[in-house]
Image (cartoon, helix red, strand yellow):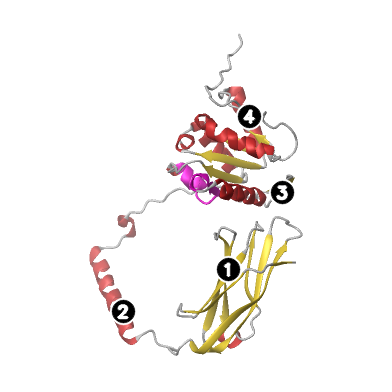
Amino acid sequence: MLEKVTKMPFVEEAPFHAYEGDEPYIFASYAHADAHMVFPELKRLNDLGLNIWYDQGIAPGNEWTEEIGEALDGCSLFIVFISRTSAESINVRNEINYALHEKKHFLAIYLEETELPPGLKLGMGSLQAILKYSMDEKEYHFRCEKAFRQNGFDISDGTVTYTKPVPRAHYEPEKPSKFNMSNLNIKMPHIIIGAVILIAIIAVVALVGFGGDDSDDVVGNIEMTIDSFKVEQDSDYPWNYSYNVSGTLSGIINPSKDYTVYSEFYDGYDDVVCTDQKVFAGKDINGSSILASASTGSDVVEKVSLQLKSSKGTVLAECNGTEISYV
C-alpha cells in the first residue's frame, strides 16, 4: 500500500525547485506557517544566484526527515528564519540543533521580534543574526550581503563566488550550575564581620587614597592625529580584512603613566564592526605610529574613531578617520 504524502496548506506556492548539485549551497529552515514571508526572500536570494535548499513545503515523514538530514550535512551555510511560530516548531528546532552540533556556519534572520526559548537562546545567543523586522529593505539587503560574504558567499559584484571560511568552533552547550549558599559552609556571623571589615577598608581608602604616584597624567596639551588608514586583504584567507591606523601622539605627559588608545571601526550605517585598544607607556608616547589595528571578515568598514584616555579614564584627545587606502 502506498503511503500518502500530504502537502501543507500553503497560500504561497514554492517559488523554485530546491537546489540539487555539488556546488556550495545554503540550507534554509523556516516554519511552514511563515511561507508567505519566507518564500519571497528565498526567491530573491535564488535570483541573485545563490543555491538554496529548502523543503518546498512537503510535510515531514520518515524518508523526508532522512533527506533533510542529508541536505543539512552537505550545506555550506545554514540560515533560519526566526519568528514566534518557528521558535516553537519542533522541526525547526531540530534543524537548528543539528546545524549547531555539526558546526555549520549559521545565520538567523528574525522576521519579527521573538523571545527565544531557553534552549535555543543558549545555543544561538552568540551566533550571527539579522533583525529584518527592525530595518528597511536597503539596510536589510546590505546586512545580508555582508553576512553572506562573512560566511564565504560573495554576491557584491552581481555574481556568486564562494571561498570556504574558517571552520566554526564546535558547539558544546553548557549545563547551568546551581548555586546554594549552604554549599559554601559560611556562617552568618562570619559574613557580618567580613562586611564590616570591607566597609572599613573602603572608608580608609576614600580618606587617604590609594597611595603611590598621584601626579596628573597630563601636564600640558596632548594631540593625536591620523596619518594613514589602511585595509589589507589576507592572501591566505581572502574573506578576512585587516585595518591599521597609523598616527602621531604628542604632548607634555607624565612618563610614569600608561595611556590607552580606544578605537571603534564603523560601517556605512554607523554600526561598530570591530574594536581595538592599545596601551602606550608615557615615556614612549611621542611619535607613536600604529595607534589601532583590527581584523574582521568584512570589507565594509568606512571610518574609525579614536580616543586617547589617561590611566584615570579621562579622555585626553580624540579624532576620526575616513580616508581608507587599500594595500
Q: Nearer the viewer, mark 1 or mark 2?
A: 1
The disc labelled 3 sits on which kind of residue? Lys
Whether residue 318 is situated above or below residue 158 in the rendered picture: below
Q: Are marks 1 and 2 in contact (CB under 8 Å)?
A: no
| Cα separation between marks 3 and 4 | 28 Å
Q: Nearer the viewer, mark 2 or mark 3?
A: 3
- On the rendered structure, is 132 left or right of 47? left
- Residue 164: numbered disc: 3
Whether residue 187 is situated above or below residue 30 in the rendered picture: below
Q: Which range is magenta?
A: 119-134
Q: Secondary structure at mark 3?
A: loop
The disc labelled 2 sits on which kind of residue? Ile
| Sooner in the amino-acid sequence: mark 3 or mark 4 | 4
Circle 3 residues within 10 Å: few <14, some 14–19, many ≥20: some
| Sooner in the amino-acid sequence: mark 1 or mark 2 | 2
| Sooner in the amino-acid sequence: mark 4 or mark 1 | 4
The disc labelled 4 sits on which kind of residue? Pro
Residue 170 makes an appearance in the image: no
Q: Secondary structure at mark 1?
A: strand
- Residue 276: numbered disc: 1
- On the rendered structure, is 87 left or right of 249? left
- Residue 201: numbered disc: 2
Residue at label 4? 15
| Sooner in the amino-acid sequence: mark 2 or mark 3 | 3
Q: Nearer the viewer, mark 3 or mark 4?
A: 4
The disc labelled 1 sits on which kind of residue? Asp
Whether residue 47 is situated above or below residue 172 in the rendered picture: above
Please report the residue visible at 58 percent of the width from the left and 14 percent of the height from the top: 4
Q: Secondary structure at mark 2?
A: helix
